């Protein structure tokens, strides 16, 4: 199955349409692997790991407006699950989901990666 088909199947399964730039980024992460940003601790999950990570942290139960795409220790990185035109990357403490507001971090996934590129 192509990465595009895997992403479409995932979107259908979770009833979320991902932002276009995030889809372009996600297509490049091989199934079962993570995209690590060197020397930062920040990692982003492949399509095959997204449901498990969101289930583990009960993201939908505590803040269904967002979908976790990666993390740095106890800090999660999120996209807006309700607006596929919103390319913003948000963050929050994974122990405070639902009780603290999401923080806008970057305008897109590529802005985040570019900032930390070595």
Image: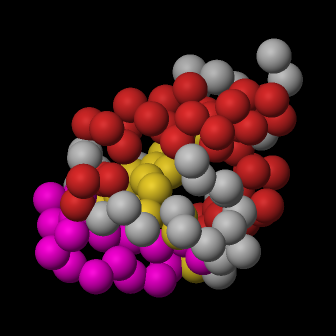
Q: How many marks?
A: 0
Indicate the quadrant where residue 32 lies.
top right
Q: Up-down: is 84 above or below 37?
A: below
Query: Residue drawn 25% across and 47% down?
Result: 58
Please give the name of the residue rendered at 49% of the width and 30% of the height, measured from the top-left corner.
49
Position of residue 56 measured from the top left corner of the image (x, y, whole percent) = 26, 37
- Position of the N terminus, as image quadrant, is top right
Q: Residue at x 38, y 82 (%)?
A: 103
The x, y position of residue 115, in whole percent, is 63, 72
- The relative height of residue 15 versus residue 94 in the rendered view (above or below) is above
Residue 13, image quadrant: top right
Q: Coloring scheme of the render?
A: secondary structure
Q: Quadrant of the C terminus?
A: bottom right
Give the image location of residue 36, x and y in percent: 55, 43
Over which residues does the magenta segment extend?
88-105
Horizontally, residue 107 falls left or right of residue 2, namely left
Residue visible at 43% across and 53% down in the picture: 68
In x, y percent, where is residue 89?
A: 55, 71
State whether residue 115 appears in this view: no
Q: Is residue 78 magenta?
A: no
């Amino acid at each position: 199955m192509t990465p595009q088909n895997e992403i479409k199947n995932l979107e259908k399964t979770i009833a979320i349409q991902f932002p276009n730039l995030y889809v372009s980024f996600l297509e490049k992460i091989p199934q079962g692997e993570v995209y690590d940003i060197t020397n930062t601790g920040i990692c982003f999950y492949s399509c095959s790991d997204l449901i498990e990570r969101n289930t583990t942290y009960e993201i939908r139960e505590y803040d269904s407006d967002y979908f976790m795409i990666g993390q740095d220790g106890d800090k999660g990185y999120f996209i807006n699950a309700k607006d596929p035109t919103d390319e913003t990357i948000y963050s929050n403490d994974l122990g405070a989901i639902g009780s603290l507001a999401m923080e806008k971090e970057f305008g897109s996934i590529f802005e985040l990666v570019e900032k930390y590129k070595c």
